[in-house]
């Protein structure tokens, strides 16, 4: 290394390198290295992650290339506590990984236990209808964990706890914020996606995407919600995890108006009901409500759905009260033309029965009594029905 440090100036920014390293310590590949507690293996892993050679790593830690090589091969060791603590600070490793126990590490473990309890209690409060109390519990926890991550003192357990706290806070905010501010809840749940990507855990990632997708749907971002929920269902590792996603996916597909996807999801839910344990969201009653809402939203009833509403056909008998008098029932004056049927609904013609004339007011002295039912003796011309309303 030159006296002015020029060759290694790009590596002098230790906080930047360490901040990037904290995410790699959370990956599945790093777990065996950390569990072994071997300093040589830890240094080799760090160099491979950042593509550093031994000279560059030695500059970061304050040692020369020869000493780093000897530590990596096991010929030398760092036995003093001060040197090990300095390595942990530079590489942002939890001190206990290298066998160091200090008050800071004890506080770290206590914070993990406190955070897990807080998240469980907040979820119970939210499900009990006290979402505002859940927000009050999760907000300071998420802020404290984020500050710790920004300082670089973190590990896999902390990142996982931060992801859970962010998701829980976002879901709780989705229950208390007004509709125009629900995007804030979706942004909080989105913070956990980056963390989940580093874990390589399909079950945890599916859970994060499921909760984030549901908040996107509530915020009105239905297309993005369907995309996230489809991804969550695709990577769900078990049938139970997939069953947790499908009701939310069906609801989002219905809100989007995607009839084909809605039919496919609801059919799979019916099939899974026989094999998957029921939960508060995945049960026949909840699925029945989701199916009804989806059918109304998609306006394309599924042929497989038992709750489909049937449109009356042309042969359906209509109550006589709403039947307009026909030409044979009404005596028209010479030279008049038959009544013109009104325009029917958007979907299909209802019947060929003509409706009442659209004249605005009845003739003077006319009786406005209801028309005679079939078989009556009252003259049809004297008992003309009021004009029908169009919706």
Image (tube, rainbow, N blue to C red):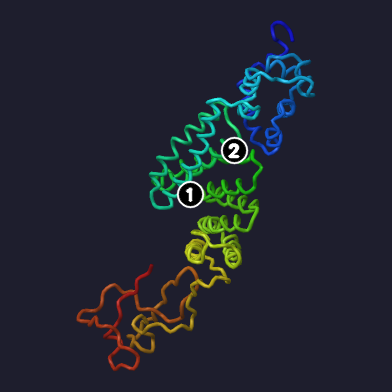
Identify the image quadrant of the C terminus.
Answer: bottom left
User: As rendered, which of 233 and 380 lies closer to the eye?
Assistant: 233
Name, please, the residue furthest toward the top. Answer: 3
Residue at 48% from the left image edge and 32% from the top image edge: 144
**Residue 195 tag number:** 2
Residue at 42% from the left image edge and 42% from the top image edge: 135
Q: Is residue 369 left or right of residue 59?
A: left
Residue 191: image location, x then y, percent? 54, 38
**Residue 220 tag number:** 1
Residue 241: image location, x then y, percent? 60, 55
Quarter of the figure with residue 321: bottom left
Residue 35: image location, x then y, percent? 68, 35
Residue 256: image location, x then y, percent? 53, 55
Other-residue count near label 2 (Cα within 10 Å), few / some / many at <14 / 14–19 / ≥20: many
Disc 2 from disc 1: Cα separation: 25 Å
**Residue 199, above or below 359:** above
User: As rendered, which of 115 and 280 lies closer to the eye?
Assistant: 115
**Residue 283, above or below 26:** below
**Residue 165, above or below 75:** below
């Amino acid at each position: 290394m030159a006296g002015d440090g020029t060759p290694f100036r790009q590596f002098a920014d230790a906080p930047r390198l360490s901040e990037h390293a904290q995410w790699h310590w959370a990956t599945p590949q790093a777990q065996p290295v950390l569990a072994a507690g071997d300093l040589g293996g830890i240094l080799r892993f760090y160099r491979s992650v950042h593509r550093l050679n031994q000279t560059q790593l030695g500059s970061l830690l304050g040692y020369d290339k020869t000493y780093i090589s000897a530590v990596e091969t096991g010929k030398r060791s760092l036995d003093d506590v001060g040197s090990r603590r300095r390595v942990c600070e530079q590489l942002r490793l939890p001190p206990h990984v290298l066998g160091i126990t200090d008050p800071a590490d004890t506080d770290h473990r206590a914070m993990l236990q406190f955070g897990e309890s807080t998240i469980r209690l907040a979820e119970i409060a939210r499900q009990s209808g006290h979402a505002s109390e859940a927000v009050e519990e999760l907000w300071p926890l998420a802020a404290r964990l984020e500050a710790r991550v920004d300082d670089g003192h973190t590990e896999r357990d902390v990142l996982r706890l931060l992801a859970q706290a962010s998701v829980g806070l976002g879901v709780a905010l989705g229950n208390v914020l007004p509709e125009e501010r629900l995007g804030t809840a979706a942004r909080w749940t989105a913070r956990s996606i980056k963390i989940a990507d580093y874990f390589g855990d399909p079950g945890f990632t599916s859970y994060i995407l499921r909760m984030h997708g549901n908040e996107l749907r509530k915020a009105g971002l239905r297309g993005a919600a369907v995309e996230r929920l489809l991804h969550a269902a695709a990577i769900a590792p078990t049938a139970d995890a997939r069953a947790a996603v499908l009701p939310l996916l069906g609801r989002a597909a219905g809100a989007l108006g995607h009839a084909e996807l809605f039919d496919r999801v609801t059919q799979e839910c019916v099939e899974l009901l026989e094999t998957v344990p029921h939960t508060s969201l995945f049960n026949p009653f909840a699925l029945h409500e989701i199916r009804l809402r989806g059918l109304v939203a998609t306006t394309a009833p599924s042929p497989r759905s038992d709750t489909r509403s049937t449109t009356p056909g042309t042969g359906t008998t209509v109550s006589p009260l709403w039947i307009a008098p026909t030409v044979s029932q009404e005596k028209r004056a010479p030279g008049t033309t038959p009544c013109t049927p009104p325009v029917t609904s958007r979907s299909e013609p209802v019947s060929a029965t003509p409706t009442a004339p659209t004249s605005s007011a009845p003739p003077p002295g006319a009786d406005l009594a209801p028309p005679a039912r079939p078989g009556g003796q009252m003259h049809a011309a004297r008992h003309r029905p009021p004009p029908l309303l169009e919706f």
